[in-house]
Image: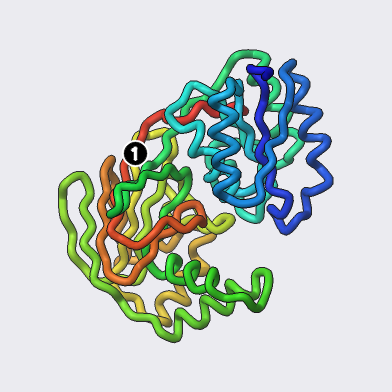
């Protein structure tokens, strides 16, 4: 079997399918690097991860994720901490990691950049975050881990069958706001423990999640640190007023909001299922550590 190939994981439904017709052009642009291009076949998230792991084991020179943060999250599980190159072609509704690390917004230009990087033998090192749950399972993530109100919204939306599309998420927000209550948290950052009640807790390797909501506006995926946001109880009105400010990241000026920074974070709370890069991880507690330079990004 051919080694030194480019493995491509594409999510045809990413971005609600609006980039579906671009895939042939992306594959052609990647092929200009002089390596065979092999699209990976997967019918589920777990199959996608397995296909990426198999590609790396078979000698792929690079794994390229074509999609949003969810597709990136799946592909990262195979390349994190490995010498294989990683490329991102942003084609999702949320491309937060791609935006944070300077990937061109245009999918074809992003693919051309990956191809040129392979030809020139250059790559950029960026940090990743790694989680450890109560069952000993480890996962990598690239952008933000949500462990508060937004995690509750994701969990509810995933249980709902209707309505379809973004309206389901909007309805989930309304339903969770109706039953909003601050929960007790214990958060440890580099060994210093904080106990408090809150509705908002998140850990970021990058500044934004959810397609540009700058929950941790100063987070830098190349500084070897994680940013952690905590907020005093805000209530329904406070949450509603805070949300519009997330696009600019100005919510961190609110005196009720605290941002911490560290290499090791542990979060404990009852009744919360954490989400990272928009993907379900599992119930708290969770430990999060920063892995400096864990991915070789081609751009």
- Residue ID for mark 1: 290
Q: What quarter of the picture does the C terminus occupy? A: top right
Residue 278 visible in the snapshot: yes
| Location of residue 83 in the rendering, given as x and y in whole percent from the top left corner | 49, 21
| Location of residue 169 in the rendering, given as x and y in whole percent from the top left corner | 58, 72
Could you tell whether 31 is left or right of 179 in the image? right
Could you tell whether 222 is left or right of 158 in the image? left
Q: Residue at x 81, y 42 (%)?
A: 22
Up/down of 177 relative to 197, above or below: below
Front-most of residues 268 and 240:
268
Front-most of residues 7 and 47:
47
Front-most of residues 16 and 197:
16
Q: Residue at x 27, y 70 (%)?
A: 270
Q: Residue at x 51, y 56 (%)?
A: 278
Up/down of 118 relative to 86, above or below: above
Q: What quarter of the picture does the N terminus occupy? A: top right
Front-most of residues 170 and 242:
170
Considering the numbered disc 1 on the image, is that residue within a helix, a strand or a loop? Answer: strand
| Location of residue 177 in the rendering, given as x and y in whole percent from the top left corner | 45, 81
Residue 39, picture quadrant: top right
Residue 41, picture quadrant: top right
């Amino acid at each position: 079997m051919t080694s030194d190939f480019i493995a491509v994981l594409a999510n045809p439904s990413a971005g609600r399918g609006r980039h579906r017709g671009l895939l042939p052009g992306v594959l052609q642009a990647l092929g200009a690097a002089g390596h065979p291009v092999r699209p990976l076949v997967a019918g589920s998230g777990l199959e996608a991860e397995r296909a990426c792991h198999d590609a790396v084991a078979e000698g792929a020179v690079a794994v390229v994720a074509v999609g949003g943060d969810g597709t990136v999250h799946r592909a990262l599980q195979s390349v994190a901490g490995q010498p294989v190159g990683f490329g991102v072609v942003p084609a999702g509704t949320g491309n937060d990691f791609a935006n944070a690390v300077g990937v061109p917004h245009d999918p074809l230009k992003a693919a051309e950049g990956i191809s040129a990087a392979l030809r020139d033998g250059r790559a950029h090192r960026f940090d990743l975050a790694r989680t450890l749950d109560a069952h000993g399972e480890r996962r990598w993530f690239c952008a933000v881990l949500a462990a508060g109100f937004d995690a509750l919204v994701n969990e509810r939306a995933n249980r709902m069958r209707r309505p379809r599309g973004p309206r389901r998420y909007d309805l989930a927000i309304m339903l969770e706001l109706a039953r909003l209550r601050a929960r007790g948290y214990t958060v440890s950052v580099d060994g210093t423990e904080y106990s408090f009640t809150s509705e908002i807790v998140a850990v970021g390797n990058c500044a934004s999640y959810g397609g540009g909501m700058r929950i941790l506006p100063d987070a830098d995926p190349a500084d070897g640190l994680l940013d952690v946001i905590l907020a005093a109880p805000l209530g329904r009105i406070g949450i509603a007023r805070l949300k519009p400010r997330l696009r600019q990241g100005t919510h961190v000026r609110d005196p009720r909001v605290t941002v911490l920074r560290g290499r090791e974070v542990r979060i404990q709370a009852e009744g919360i299922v954490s989400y990272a890069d928009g993907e379900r991880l599992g119930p708290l507690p969770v430990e999060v550590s920063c892995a400096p330079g864990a991915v070789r990004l081609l751009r």
